[in-house]
């Protein structure tokens, strides 16, 4: 049961890793942001997750009920209504490099704006290379374990000793990768030999 959960976790983590790499490459020419607005308690909050120049940004924008009417009048939107939308635009400048960790992509900013109405915002920046490393950990561990088991003559799936049955694991029924690839190639190899024999007879 634990092995099955780890295998599924590794697969999901690998998919997330590939998706993160795609978003990482896309974050330089394009900025993608997903926004979700909702009312919670005595305030209206707008949460946003976006990518920008190799960074993943998570922000929370809060408007208290005492200032909601003013903000709604200025923006022309009802903040008490749940809303989910997607924004795509040009990349912007990231956080200012005031600390050494900002150069690596880490940053956190909290501000309170008073411009006729009072709001607060919090934004956290995380480098996407860190997300790639985190999501790549489980697939890498799985790959290392498979290689170690193959070198030891054991099944890469369940670890059963395959020295007596190298073609198929008697415990879980798995076929070794080399044997599997040979079985896939055999029809093509047989067809090629038959074609060569026919051409030799015709010639």
Image (tube, grey):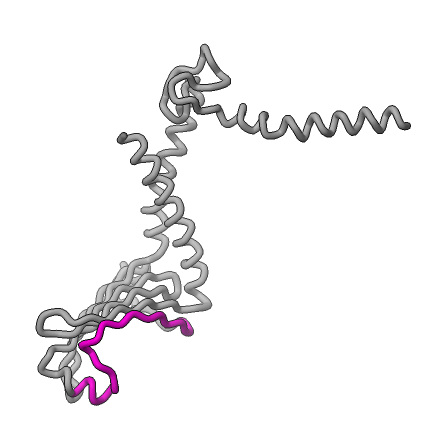
Q: Extreme right residue here?
A: 203
Q: Extreme top residue here?
A: 164
Counting labels gives: 0
The magenta region covers: 70-91
Q: Residue at x 42, y 50 (%)?
A: 18
* Depth order, front residue of 166/120: 166
Q: Residue at x 35, y 47 (%)?
A: 133
Query: From what the image shows, is residue 143 above or below residue 64?
Result: above
- Give how far across and how far down residue 11 sits, in percent: 38, 41
Q: Quadrant of the N terminus?
A: top left
- Give how far across and how far down residue 166 sits, in percent: 48, 16
User: Is residue 19 located in the magenta-colored stretch of the structure?
Assistant: no
Q: Residue at x 33, y 58 (%)?
A: 127
Query: From what the image shows, is residue 55 above or below residue 21?
Result: below
Q: Residue at x 62, y 29 (%)?
A: 185
Query: From what the image shows, is residue 55 above or below residue 134?
Result: below
* Depth order, front residue of 118/79: 79
* Depth order, front residue of 89/169: 169
- Give how far across and how far down residue 139 sits, in percent: 37, 39
Q: Quadrant of the C terminus?
A: top right
Which corner quadrant of the image does residue 156 belong to?
top left
47 on left or right of 141: left
């Amino acid at each position: 049961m634990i092995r099955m959960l780890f295998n599924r976790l590794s697969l999901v983590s690998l998919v997330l890793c590939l998706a993160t790499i795609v978003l990482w490459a896309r974050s330089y020419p394009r900025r993608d942001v997903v926004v979700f607005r909702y009312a919670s308690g005595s305030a209206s909050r707008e949460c946003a997750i976006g990518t920008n120049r190799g960074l993943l940004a998570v922000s929370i924008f809060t408007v208290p009920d005492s200032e909601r009417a003013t903000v709604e009048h200025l923006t022309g939107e009802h903040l008490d209504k749940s809303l989910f939308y997607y924004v795509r635009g040009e990349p912007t400048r990231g956080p200012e490099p005031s600390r050494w960790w900002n150069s690596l992509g880490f940053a956190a900013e909290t501000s309170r704006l008073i411009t006729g109405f009072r709001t607060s915002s919090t934004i956290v920046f995380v480098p996407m290379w860190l997300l790639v490393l985190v999501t790549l950990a489980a697939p890498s561990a799985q790959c290392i374990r498979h290689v170690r088991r193959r070198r030891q003559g054991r099944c890469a799936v369940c670890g059963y000793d395959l020295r007596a049955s190298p073609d198929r694991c008697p415990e879980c029924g798995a076929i070794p990768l080399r044997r599997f690839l040979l079985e896939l190639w055999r029809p093509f190899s047989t067809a090629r030999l038959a074609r060569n024999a026919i051409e030799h007879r015709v010639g």
